[in-house]
Image (cartoon, rainbow, N blue to C red):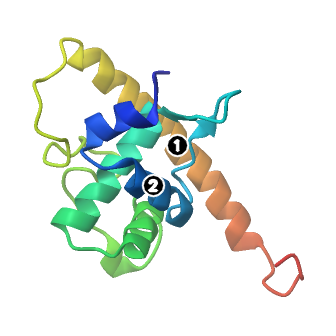
Amino acid sequence: MAEFSIGEVEGLTGLKAHVLRYWEETIPFIRPRKDDRGRRVYTSRDVDLILRVKHLVQERKYTLEGAGERLVVELTGSGPADAGESGPGFAGTEPIDDAAPAADPAPSADSRLSAARAAIDELRANLLELYGMVKKRDPGDGDG
């Protein structure tokens, strides 16, 4: 799986590093790992999620928290009935073209797209598992 530094993610998404760091605090799915020097290392999956959040916030006018909730709905296929939306970027469909920054297409766009789809499928499976654990959790268990 491809890995990117925060500077590379800035270039791919058009977002500043401080915005990316803030989104990490607010959106639980955006969690780059840190290397042995403490630097953030983003995966293709992280970049895909960041681009989806960017689209929801900037184009669809969601709050950042609302965009995070929307990701749960999209990736798990569950949530309020009125939260569903068909079209680009919804789970199981083509990626959002208008969320990508304006740039020349990479020469290996097909391989990047395949890798992105595989990463999204893996993320969807992980989120379904997490959602199931959260849903089963007893709010009065004191684990807080």
Q: Please state which of residues 43 and 78 is positioned toward the viewer in this rendering.
A: 43
Q: Quadrant of the C terminus?
A: bottom right
Residue at 81%, 80% (x, y): give it.
138
Residue at 46%, 30% (x, y): give it.
5
Of helix, strand and loop, which one carries label 2?
helix
**Gap between marks 1 and 2 measured at Cα:** 8 Å
- Crowd rating for badge 2 (residues with CA inside 10 Å; few <14, some 14–19, many 20+): many
Badge 1 amino acid: Leu
Q: Do the residues labelled 1 and 2 touch (CB within 8 Å)?
A: yes
Residue at 55%, 62% (x, y): give it.
25
Q: Please state which of residues 48 and 114 is positioned toward the viewer in this rendering.
A: 48
Residue at 89%, 82% (x, y): give it.
142
* Residue 23, quarter of the rendered image: bottom left
What residue does disc 1 label? 123
Lower sequence index among marks 1 and 2: 2
* Residue 143, quarter of the rendered image: bottom right
Q: Is residue 76 visible?
A: no
**Residue 106 % position (x, y):** 19, 18
Badge 2 amino acid: Leu
75 in relation to 85, above or below:
above
As drawn, the residue found furthest toward the bottom would be: 140
**Residue 19 % position (x, y):** 39, 57
Compared across the picture, whether 64 is left or right of 130 comes to left
- Crowd rating for badge 1 (residues with CA inside 10 Å; few <14, some 14–19, many 20+): some
Compared across the picture, whether 65 is left or right of 137 comes to left
**Residue 26 % position (x, y):** 51, 66
Residue 75 image label: 2
Compared across the picture, whether 14 is left or right of 142 comes to left
Q: Please state which of residues 82 and 51 is positioned toward the viewer in this rendering.
A: 51
